[in-house]
Amino acid sequence: MNQIFKDKQDFITQYRAMVRANTGKEFELCGSHDRFYALAELIATRARRIASENELEIENTGQKRVYYFSLEFLIGRLLDNYLLNFGIRDMVSDALKEMGTTLEELEIREPDAALGNGGLGRLAACFLASAAHEGIAFYGNGMRYEYGLFKQEIVDGRQVELADNWLKHDYPWESRRPESAVEVVFGGTSVSYEKDGRTMWRIDGGQKILAVPYDIPVVAYGGKLVNKLRVWKAEPNEDLFDLDAFNRGDYAQANAGRAEAEAISTILYPADAGEHGKILRLKQEYLFVAAGINSILRTFRKEHGSDWKLLPEYVAIHTNDTHPAMCGPELMRVLMDEEGLEWDEAWDIVTKTVSFTNHTVLPEALEKWPITTFKPLLPRLYQIIDEIARRFRESFPSDNPEWREMFQKTAILWDGEVRMANLSIVCSHSVNGVAELHTKILKEQVFKEFYELTPEKFNNKTNGVTHRRFLAEANPSYSKLITSKIGTGWLDDAMELKKLEDYVDDEDFLLAMAASKRENKERLARYIKETTGIVVDPSSVFDVQVKRFHAYKRQLLNIFKVMDIYNRLLDDPDFTVRPTTFIFSGKAAQSYYFAKEVIRLINSVADVVNSDERVNDRIKVVFIPNFRVSNAQLIYSAAEISEQISTAGQEASGTSNMKLMMNGAITLGTLDGANIEIADLAGRENVKIFGLTEPEVVALQKSGHYFSWDEYNADRDRLGRCVDELTDSTFSRLSGTFDSIRRELMDNNDHDLVLKDFHSYVQAWEELTEAYGDTLAWNRMALHNTANSGHFSSDRTIREYRDEIWHA
Ligand code: AZC
């Protein structure tokens, strides 16, 4: 551990001094807002000092640097995490109590930084933490959005979006670095000129934007190493304030130039899949790529001079999905146009430096840009992409009998569009999927032709999550229990959780697990009461589905299950059910009508069920608004059933499945994404699997023999009835019926096979909740899950990236 304070007294003295310096007041006279900012500042100062020591060491030892380009970093709150990582959480918590406040009171003052949408953005944040833990010189490169992911409120059952003004007060962890700002050019014309007998290119004119970096420290567990997340803000590069316009009283015009530049970093695009074609999004993508590449090369030049051949030895550039796909072309541009390298030399460097992760098989999420948008905005980059595409085409093996098909599928420019996934693959030396099944689908279906051409590029890196945040921090009572048996080594090395297997027959331990879960459920029940007004029973089963709303994730299947149980409780006097609280949380993209209707349906069912005295001693339905990292931590730790019910083949990996597994929830899931690996590791007897498998889904869809009406007609009493209730008055009281959901199921033939998997799902749920009756057996299952979850620590994932992709 890195001792950043000698002892508690030392901490209190320094903290008081910081409060005084920041506010001019004594601690006792400050509110929790000021107290939080001073505490964060105190920790941040220490972190920055360690970071600059680390920088020096990296420079001196010539350690390879890994740059992780991601448009999203869903980092959430940092204070608690940094206290844990510095090993001073308990000490600080004690000290604060002595001083008359509590850590919890201060923590909630921190903005919950939501610079990401969901899985992809949170994965990037987990990677920051784990890379620091593994001692890698790892730098996140992203955008400093003024507004993060929207805040969600529920009004009459509907999702309403509000701006997330997270920078309203200062952000205590960041430091602005104006001396490292980079000029980024949009538009203009690409012109050639002769230099030393060679044709060179430059851009004339165009709009010049200044990208200004802000650095956020990333503290490793143990506190010895501090890395950096660098996020970029767009600003006008000169004072564009129009004084004449201002004096005329035209204030909008006076600020127009400034506003146009700043718009680029104003807002995070709120879609986790889709929502393309917006020129502002393309500007964001280029801005953070160009600024990031520039700052990488500046550091390299300072340390190693201009021997660019050495770049792949000292630098790895990883592109998180296709949003940073311009890394390859931009690096080509700088190496050729600014450093004077020849194409072949530059290309060799680029392809040895850049690597790429794909996160989705959804065709609508594979980014494409119309050439008519791309070319005028980035004329020189387009030229380079055109040349990359041409050379790739010419390298094509035309003796292959299926070359036409291959040619079309692998084209970078096609049908008037730039295909960012194909560009990413061609520019990278490594392409990975995020779970075994997903990687297999990439190889055999989505990128089949690329896999045939370059099989050596493709590899799998199953996702992981940081167990220090999602187990240690999220679940203090369980962590304490774990530590009491196996010591603290698991915080460092999650594989040590395996030692818990020794306790599977220790009744006291199993009962202590149950007590810890109960404590977490009570904590969540209080939060639910505060945020929704709904009172839930902590002795009921907590059945949880929390994630983005998407058709393929099938929250609809889950609520159909609830509707069916409700109907049967009303109609069938012999039907019994284990008392259960069905908990949902998550956001839908603003423009995703179907997903928003599913949210409205869940809230409408909740409204009816929770106020029906005939059933509400047995079932309750809760939609927790505004899912984000901070309330996620409360939910995961209280969960008992982990709903992972996507249509097989659609969820690339999933990561809430891992977080919930660590916390001892039992997976009720399809054989999709990382669920398969969870089932293998925990043991089939410790999870509950149902539904079609991926090959079965593919076969069924290919056969053309799936008809949702057949499912409906085969079970009019239960399934058919649920479908009908979408459009009758059963759940319409709050805000009307659900015609579009019914149309999707019946007129569009149920693309996601909700009706097909309905019976096996409900049956699996009934069997699983039946098993809940045996407390010891249930907690034994839970323990097997926690004990085998070490594999899903992002520490393991990061080590695989390091050893097999980055070679750092
Ligand atoms: C998600 C995948 O949907 C999810 O399965 C995976 O666990 C996560 O990435 C991390 O790899 N994808 C996204 O969030 N977004 C996109 C564009 O794929």
Image (cartoon, rainbow, N blue to C red):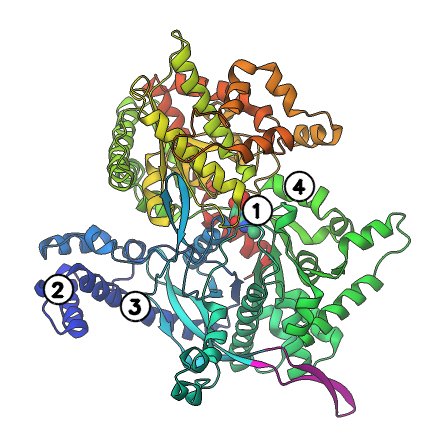
Q: Earlier in the sequence, mark 2 or mark 1?
A: 2
Report the front residue among 261 and 487.
261
Name the residue located 25 percent from the left edge and 57 percent from the top edge.
109
Distance (Cα) linking label 3 and label 1: 35 Å
**Which residue ends up furthest to the bottom in the rendered image?**
196
Amino acid tagged 1: Val
Distance (Cα) linking label 3 and label 2: 17 Å
Q: Earlier in the sequence, mark 1 or mark 4?
A: 1
Q: Can the viewer see residue 699?
A: yes
Residue stretch rendered in magenta on the structure: 186-207
Amino acid tagged 4: Lys
Q: Main secondary structure of the magenta part?
A: strand
Amino acid tagged 3: Asp
**Which residue ends up furthest to the top in the rendered image?**
574
Distance (Cα) linking label 4 and label 3: 45 Å
Q: Secondary structure at mark 3?
A: loop
Name the residue located 77 percent from the left edge and 88 percent from the top edge.
198
Q: Which mark is residue 440?
A: 4
Amino acid tagged 2: Cys
The residue beneath circle 1 is: 434
The residue beneath circle 2 is: 30
Q: Nearer the viewer, mark 4 or mark 3?
A: 3
Decide if ligand 1 comes within 8 Å of the CB at mark 1: yes
Q: Secondary structure at mark 4?
A: helix
Crowding around mark 4 (Cα neighbors within 10 Å: few <14, some 14 to 19, many 20+) is: some
Asked if disc 4 and disc 3 are in contact, CB closer than 8 Å, the reply is: no
Horizontal and vertical percent position of residue 697: 66, 30
The residue beneath circle 3 is: 170
Q: Nearer the viewer, mark 4 or mark 2?
A: 2
Q: Quadrant of residue 474?
A: top left
Crowding around mark 3 (Cα neighbors within 10 Å: few <14, some 14 to 19, many 20+) is: few
